[in-house]
Image (cartoon, rainbow, N blue to C red):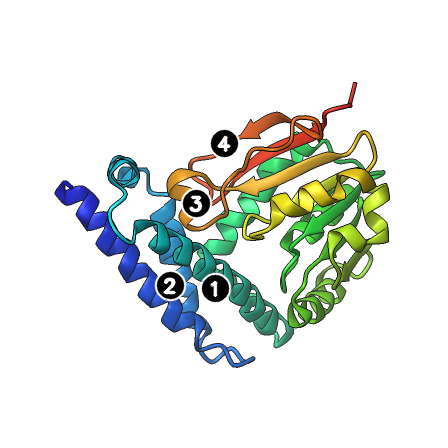
Amino acid sequence: MTGGASGLLLLMERHLRRLRACGGQYDGTTRHSAELERAVGDYSAFVTDTRHHEAWAELERATPPGFGDLVGELRVVSARCASLMEKYRALRLLAGDPATAGYFANVESGIEAEFGAFGLTSSSSVLLVGSGAFPMTPLLIGGRTGARVVGLDIDEEAVALGRRVVAALGPGLDIRLEREPAQESAFTAGASHVIFSSTVSVKYEILRAIHARTGDDVVVAMRYGDRFKSLFNYPREEVDSAMWTLAEQVLRPEHVFDVALYVKATRR
């Protein structure tokens, strides 16, 4: 391997150690929030730095020992840290501190850019899988369009915090957060749009599971990250062509995730 590829491996290992250490400090308070915010902010800048792409391509070709395991662990640990970042942000907001971090600014600007692709209106019914403790997407969609939004998450603490955040920031918005799987939610059948968080590891399994329960005209927005961005996102997967059709990809090098839009294969 060249020095660039070896150096990138070392950077990946360094980020993993830092994220693992910061993520392990969470205790339900904001005592350690600053360290995690810096770590996640630096990591999001790292995965959106296109200067690493050449070295990444070399690593993909060479697949040195332990490379696949390192990539997989970075996805898991960074996803956990992103969820903890939302908990910290929620706790700080509820304590009267609305300050935000650069990571959230990047994510929020990405959500703004998605609106045109989604075609959302006030009559839309939006289902978000992986809403988190600080439900930025429901708040932005509800505030901008007036659409009805239901956010789902399997983390009980995240749902509880998210409900308090919605009550504080969007008391008049039609937003509901629930702790249940998408394939069991009564809202799924009437959803006009479904959005999947990029850090939901089983998002394509859920996509297959909800096919029979969703309407013919549903639009699915799958947030993902391929290649170098897959260090902070679960990548795009092939779908069953009898179920879903990839209608569009929204690629944004400066954002931490990209978006794949799917419609049903039977849609006319």
For the point 54% across and 70% down, which residue is it? 88
Q: Amino acid at mark 1?
A: Cys
Q: Amino acid at mark 3?
A: Ser
- Foreground tag (3 vs 2): 3
- Taking the image as shown, residue 157 lies to the left or right of residue 101, namely right
132 relative to 32, above or below: above
145 relative to 116, above or below: below
CA gap, disc 4 and disc 1: 24 Å
Residue found at the far left of this picture = 3
Nearest the eye: 41 or 246? 246
Say whether disc 4 or disc 2 marks the residue closer to the N-terminus.
2
Name the disc covering residue 39, or none. 2
Say whether disc 3 or disc 4 marks the residue closer to the N-terminus.
3
Name the disc covering residue 81, or none. 1
Name the disc covering residue 230, or none. 3
C-beta proximity under 8 Å, tags 3 and 4:
no
Residue at numbered disc 4: 251
Tell me the element at label 4. loop
Say whether disc 3 or disc 2 marks the residue closer to the N-terminus.
2
Q: Amino acid at mark 4?
A: Leu
C-beta proximity under 8 Å, tags 2 and 1:
yes
